[in-house]
Image (tube, rainbow, N blue to C red):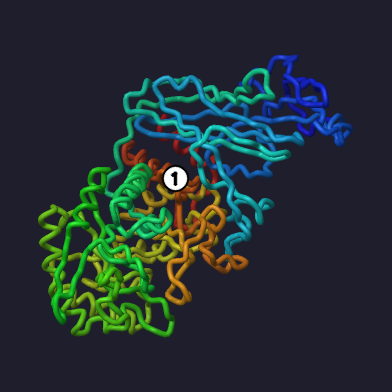
Amino acid sequence: MNRYPLTRTLVVVLAAQLNLIGDPIVTTSPADPELANGPLVITTDFLSGFGWNQRELELREPAISFWLASSLKRVYPTSLPGSRQALDQITPRNARFSFQACLRNDRSWPAEVECSVSGADDLTVQVRRVGYVPQWNYTGDTPETELDGIGHVPGLVPDPLFPESKATVGPFATQSFWITVRVPAEARVGSRKLIVHFRSPILKKDATLTVRVQVHPLVVRPRAGFPVTHWWNADAIYDWYKQPVLGEEWFRAVRPYLENMIEHGSDVILVPMFYMRREIVERPPQLLVVNERGPGQYSFDWSRVKRFVDLAREVGFRQFEWPHFWSYKVDPAKASVDTPTRVYQWKEGRAELLWPKDTEATGAVYRNFLAQFLPEFRDFLARENLLDTSFFHLSDEPGGNPQDLENYRKARELLRELAPWMKVMDAMSDIRYGREKGLTDIPVPAVHAAQAYIDEGIPHWVYYCMGPRGPYLNRFFDTPLAKIRMSGWLFYKLRAQGFLHWGYNYWYVMDLSFNPKTKVLVDPFTDGASGTSAGGAGAPYGDAFVVYPGANGPIDSIRWEVFAESLQDYAILQTAGIKPDDPRLAGIRTYAQFPKSEEWIVKTLADILR
């Protein structure tokens, strides 16, 4: 008997000579999908090409099930069929929405399937195949109630979205397609139906499912006053594609990645003027050419920096972020802001540090460099009209020990002396950095520390990184998608002034300067934990990247798509004139206490649009 007691279409597959598959014959018509409950199940009579399991197959009535799922539910290779043959979507204009079209092959042979959508009219539809990547353990320090994939991990989990509309679905396996619908600003208001088609050689006719779309009159305006930046690794691109450092090939390869960030709501771009990471590398991604003409005498070539800024502007960036001037802390026994950032020069084809790696942070050597560099930097920013659209950093994630604070103060005073025009922002969770007037201009606490800044009325951005975990907002492989989708709602309600994340495309073994070899590439399709997976104690899966390297540019992840739609929600709230203290947002209390269900998102969004 069929395991799923559902309305179904009977398809008889005749066995040809030698028990090979013959042409299918459809003997009944499918039920109206808008009236059906459960998936569309197509049952096949199937004889094995080799005959050894014929009896078992005759008893099981091999079937393929088709259904629809929202964009907030992960569909695993081992997932059983869902229950929707029809789906309702409400959308504003100048927006996009996503859903999934899914199938499960309960046959003992693979099924070749193609997915397409008709009826889009003035909407644009993109169909992508959901790919699966290994996850060997759940994120540590997180209760089951805050995890997705219970019962599927260890195993394969859905994340990359391949630009393909066909799939080979193995025996007793599930596959989904991610369907993105873009609604232009001038789209016709009202309802329409999208028909999802599954086509396969084993089907006499398409299996079809229905998506009912209601286009609302609201035209979403671009998000305003909430900058978003994702730190990206320029070196990961030339290392992955085996290119020379920052050459012509690299500039061509970078463009689709920059376009991808713009498309997903990132509107601030980090300019790799210097290499921000602490480890010493052979091929540093440093756009600025620095030469030491004589002892302590430096010259600067800004041509590659300008070329990159021009490229970023071409694809849509209007705000720019510049690397830290001091290195971050990695050794717990040492203090933060203890050394200058790594600056390289090239000699005889090799990159060399301008000064020893343990040079004093605010000593004579680095003070001399900054005294020559900072005036030229300001001149460049002024020539390129970047002074009013730039964000500057001092040092990343300074600690809260007395020496950490003192070192940060000294560095800040040096910058204030040499560059009084410069305002700084840094990821820093200790509230004392925010309290002390003039120490930093834009504090960026992690979301678990943001409440202290909120309580004291200190304006701030927010970020998350390898943590916090548990009930807090984040976007790992096993963070529930509804939780990720709440990002924009939380930023809006809790009045954050911007968002920062470190991991757009860090495709390396996680390196804190202790590794025997630096910049070891990982394959993100097989290692989502940056080479550190250790029973949940290493880097959480998905922390280091949200895109995968494709042949012609980035391959999006499900997490990246859902996060982008959360930023769209932020723009919808702005456009609709919703106030952060609106009663409909009252359930959002902190970055740990907030609604985490798809039902809340759907209901609240529909209420705002109606």
Residue 435 position, x and y percent, is: 29, 71
Name which residue lies at 49% across and 59% down: 472
Res. 397 image quadrant: bottom left
Query: In the depicted view, which residue is nearer to us: 540 or 256?
Result: 256
**Mark 1 residue crowding within 10 angstroms, few (<14) / some (14–19) / many (20+):** few
Q: Please tell me whether residue 415 is drawn above or below residue 307 in the rendered image.
A: below
Query: In the depicted view, which residue is nearer to us: 62 or 520?
Result: 520
> Which residue in the rendered view is the most extreme toward the front?
348
Q: Is residue 571 shown left or right of residue 104?
A: left
Q: Secondary structure at mark 1?
A: loop
Res. 49 image quadrant: top right
Can you identify the residue that label 1 sits on? Answer: 551
Q: Is residue 144 shown left or right of residue 172?
A: left
The amino acid marked with disc number 1 is Ala
Residue 112 position, x and y percent, is: 64, 31
Where is the N terminus found, in terms of image quarters?
Answer: top right
Where is the C terminus found, in terms of image quarters?
Answer: top left
Numbered-mark total: 1
Name which residue lies at 50% across and 33% down: 127
**Res 583 seen here:** no
Query: In the depicted view, which residue is nearer to us: 159 or 531?
Result: 531
Name which residue lies at 14% across and 53% down: 384
Name which residue lies at 42% across and 80% down: 331
Residue 283 position, x and y percent, is: 35, 66
Residue 155 position, x and y percent, is: 65, 53
Query: In the depicted view, which residue is nearer to us: 10 or 91?
Result: 10
Q: Is residue 232 shown left or right of residue 368?
A: right
**Res 207 seen here:** yes
> Which residue in the rendered view is the most extreme toward the right?
55
Q: Please tell me whether residue 535 is drawn above or below residue 401 in the rendered image.
A: above
Q: Please tell me whether residue 559 is drawn above or below residue 95 in the rendered image.
A: below
